[in-house]
Image (cartoon, rainbow, N blue to C red):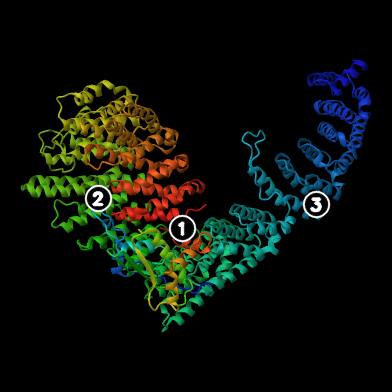
Amino acid sequence: MSDNPNPVVYIVDGEKEKQNQLNSLNNESRYTVDEDEIDPFDELEIFDLVRNITDPEHPLTLEQLNVVRIENITIDNEKGTIKLYFTPTVPHCSMANLIGLSIKEKLSRSLPKRFKVDVIVTPGSHSSESTVNKQLNDKERVSAALDKSSNILTIVNESIRIN
Amino acid sequence: MNQNELLQLTEAYCNNNNEDSVRSGALNHILLSMSSKKIEIHSLVLSLGDYLKSRDSILRARGTLLLSEVLCRLPDLPLNQDQLHFLSAFFSDRLQDYSCAAEVIKGLTGLLTNHTLEYPNNQKILRGIFTEVHPSTLPHSHRKMVLQIINIMFDKCLPEIQELKSDFMAGYLQFIDGEKDPRNILYSFQLLPKVIKNIPEYAKFTESLFEILSCYYPISFNPKPNDPNSISKDDLSNALLSCFVCTPLLAQHCIPFLIDKICSNLVETKIESLHTLVYCCKNYGPYAITPYLEDIWSTLRTNILTHKKENVIEESKKTIFQLTRIFTRDETVLNSFLEIIIKECLHHIKSSQDSKISIYCASILFQTVCASPISSKIVLKTILPNLFSFFKDISIAAGGNESGTLKINEQVSIIGLLNDIIKANMISFQQQEKQYDGENPLTPYHDTLYQLLSDSLLNSSSAMRSASIECLSNLYISKKSNDSFNFLLDREKRDTILKVLVSLINSTDDTLRQKSLDSIYNIATNEETTILNGYVVPTLLQMINSVSADNTRELQYYLDAFGKLCSHQLLLDTVIPQIQGLIQHNIKESWSTKEDFEKSKLVLLSISKILDSSTNETSMTICCQSILFPLIKGLFKQIIYIATAINNQQQQQQHLDYFNIICTPCLDTIRSIIQNTSRSSQENAITDVIDVYLNGNLSLLFPDNVQEFKPFASATPLIYKYLIPIFTCIISQSKTDLSSNQSLKQALFDTSLDLNVPDHISIECVKSYASILNKQSPNEITIEYFKSNIIAPILSNESSLPLKLRLIVLLTWCTKALLTNGHPINIELATFISSLISNPDSDISKLACKSFYTLLCDSDILNDKSGSVIKILYQQKFFTLMFSILLNSFKENKDNQMLSSKYLIAISNLLEHVSKDMLLGELDEILPIVMHSLKSFVVTNNNNEDTNESQQSYLLLESSLQTLLMLIKETPTSFTSYLDSLVPSLIKLSVSAPNQKSRKSSLEILYFISVSIPYHNIYPFRGKVIAGIVPALDDKKRLVRRDASKCRNSWYILSK
């Protein structure tokens, strides 16, 4: 049985403000066609990559569950760092590791190598925050978890299937 | 014939040392003599005596075979009862002789097929076969003969066989056990139902019978391609299925067996077993299934709740639906089956909202309610009161509790479930009406439901409200009986619902709005139009008219709502006057503000959309009578106003811009009306516009106007020519041949080449001219006409370049018109166009390339709606001819890269609109060209100078990639053999192509490769692609990056 059988489902475009902001994600004006103009990486683009990841135990996306929010993503193009805070649905969520792993893997597959990506639990949102953070940002443990033969890889792949 | 001769013949036949021809000659001789009664059977047996008794088993077999051949091949051989008795006794006895078994079986087949044996010879033979013959020692054809013998005996002497009772069953089962030949399996499957029907003792043998049958399940059989028996897997499966269901007594073995198979790991087996289960249950009847209800349910539940494959879940749900429907025949069984399901689903729903489990449970309940009104009644009886009280409990618990939002979500999902149930009930009740004469199962609950839902509408949560809206609309259209408009809810409640829904269209919450609009539409398609016209439509129109001009978002919303309602045919017919009102209101001579204009534009745009989606002839004929001319009149007024009242050049231009913008939706509207109106009203309309445009008779539009109106005359001010598209638009859609009207043709021809007329008007004239040409009788059109009027001026040095370009456009459209109706000269004209590709003037050659796009593209004329003459498969025919011409030119100019790439562009333009089946035929020609152009680009991609040549090569690259993309979407598997060179080129292009469109297309193609080509073919490239496109992740363009990450992710998770 899942830890949190009844998570709150946030309507993806709830408030007006946020809606306009998110709508701009699909707004073609963000995608310039002029060859010489450079589109820098921005928060929306990162958010676009992770919003459709699905929760391993619900048929819902991380965006719908408010696990990831655009305001919790910061990016520094010059230093090449990306920081993403994610909020597990409940403080004792045992899936937090898996969700974090999915986010991390999706980003590492989708971003150029020059970025260093930190995926961190939003402070105060999980009972064993530091353990999760440690696990997620330990390269060896991540690569062990995503070993070809591991079941975890299957689950992660399933979660990030939708582009 | 004397005995000696006969002896010689038998000797010739039986001697194994003789050649085949000698032996068959002897046999034929004997057969002929016997049929002409020169030899008696008696003397034959006598002459065979030695062989039949011989100690040499081969000779004995030969002797027996001769006798068998005689019996088989002479069906009319006269035999008396004594002889028959003798022969049958002989054969029965011979059965013990192991070495002659096959020959004996053959003889028996002949004997039984052609003659009728007396009691108890048949029994004796059968016993002999069952005890003495081992099926494995017989060749497959003889095993089949045994089955045939049994079949014949069933037909000829059933009582005699029935006397054998259990002995028969035992022998028979032993005989068919372990059969491997598909032909025999099929025969024995087909025989089995007959056996079961006639031998009641089978009941003792069901277990072994089922054991024999079940080892074949599920049938996996690959027929050989040129099998003369042409047995297919389906034949075998169907025969096996009919064996499974031939008696309900098999249920005790079959159902547990199938349940076991359903748990198999193979998806195909699972699905086939589910189908079989449904089929079996249908035939066994509900009673026989009773002991297995629990098992069946738990297996299906496990499938639905835990399986990953969507199709397994879907099939399992369907199985529940089918089973419920089958059980409807027996109410006690149905009750116990549903009781188990309801209990468990209810438990899950109460304990875990929102999770996958409860969603699946809801869908299971949906299936059970859908199945039949009776099952619906049973489910509703338990589920609804339970849900009502559960809902109430939550509301009480939610009051003042901090987990309020959580509780709301639970309530929302309950309302969602209620909605599903109402919908499912509607399906079962309204489709099965004929067998069911009770009341709608929902009847006892509709009041409570209505109350609950209208209360929820007041809830503060918008999710809750939007769920209730949808549910209410479904409740609204639930009917008492299948009579139209006999609703469960009374008029007063229905009116209230409609009012609430209409008021919600004004809501600020978009989801709520959308939901209420969908719900109104849902109601509109089921409710009388008078009720809608009484309140909903007028309110909506009022909203459209009163919304302030600067609030385009709101306006658009109301218009969409209106459009959506109008997509309901019956309603559209009744609101045509209102639409006319809208048109008159919005085509004005001038607009005071820009916002005002925008508003009119949106209104006209949505009217054109409304009429575009309706193709009904009657309603369009009404439109033709009431909308068409007021609309044209409005546009005329506008132009007259601009021409007469405005003198300032700049202002005039601004007004003309407005006119052009307004004109587009109006033309669309006119086109939809003219296309779909009845033929006679179309003819009238065309006569009228010709009268106006060519004869200058304006009085049709403006009765008191006497002014001359000659838009086609060259002296007419340009501004009036802006009205020409209205005319051409109507003429192009004519279903009748207008070619006899010379002045019409001339006017169109001249205007299309008139360089003073803007391009968009010229092209309209060209199209209109082409559409007339299309309908003209083929004998009247000659190549000379085109040569002297169009081709000569193109080639002449005296014509100016703009005129030449116009001429090429005209020629292209004329060719298209003749190509569509299959006129033989079309290919000659197209060949001329292709020759223009090598024209030194780059504008001309570019336009010629583009022409090949136009020739086959879809347009608003020359299609079946516009009454054009369309020859069947004209595109294919043209493509085959033209493709080889272009291909040859391409090959001839291979060394001239500039020229060959132009031809390649023309080819890819041509490919764009060809049906995919045709492409497949030419794939062997096309693919190498496309690959070649990709490769050549990858190799020569070093010069970054912006010369004309590199421009050209970009264009080429672009069009090759587009072609490739299109091909890969259609026939991914044909690329398998090209992957070796294709993938590396694409990787290279995706990171280094100079323009982003090409990079993006390369990534898209790579993505399609990953999802559509079989795993084992693409796996070798996985690592290469994943590593190769990394630089594209850091592309400077966001669009490219998006596709890169999509593509890379897809290659990461390649699956079998």
The mark that comes first in sequence, 1 or 3, is: 3
Callout count: 3
Q: How far apart are marks 2 and 3 (CA)?
A: 82 Å
Mark 2 residue type: Glu
Give the camera-side residue of B706 and B782.
B782
Which residue was labeled with disc 3?
B202
* Dot 1 crowding, Cα within 10 Å, few <14, some 14–19, many 20+: few
* Dot 2 crowding, Cα within 10 Å, few <14, some 14–19, many 20+: few
Pinpoint the chain carrying mark 2. Answer: A
* Residue B127 vertical position relative to residue B70 in the rendered view, above or below: below
Same-subunit check for callouts 2 and 1: no
Q: Nearer the viewer, mark 2 or mark 1?
A: 2
Mark 1 residue type: Ser
* Residue B694 vertical position relative to residue B268 in the rendered view, above or below: above
Left or right placement of residue B626 versus residue B157 in this view: left
Left or right placement of residue B458 versus residue B642 in this view: right
Residue A88 visible in the picture? no
Callout 2: helix, strand or loop?
A: loop
Pinpoint the chain carrying mark 3. Answer: B
Which residue was labeled with disc 2?
A35
Quarter of the N terminus of chain B within the rendering: top right
Which residue was labeled with disc 1?
B484
- Expressed as whole percent of the image width and height from the top left, the position of residue A160 reads 44, 61
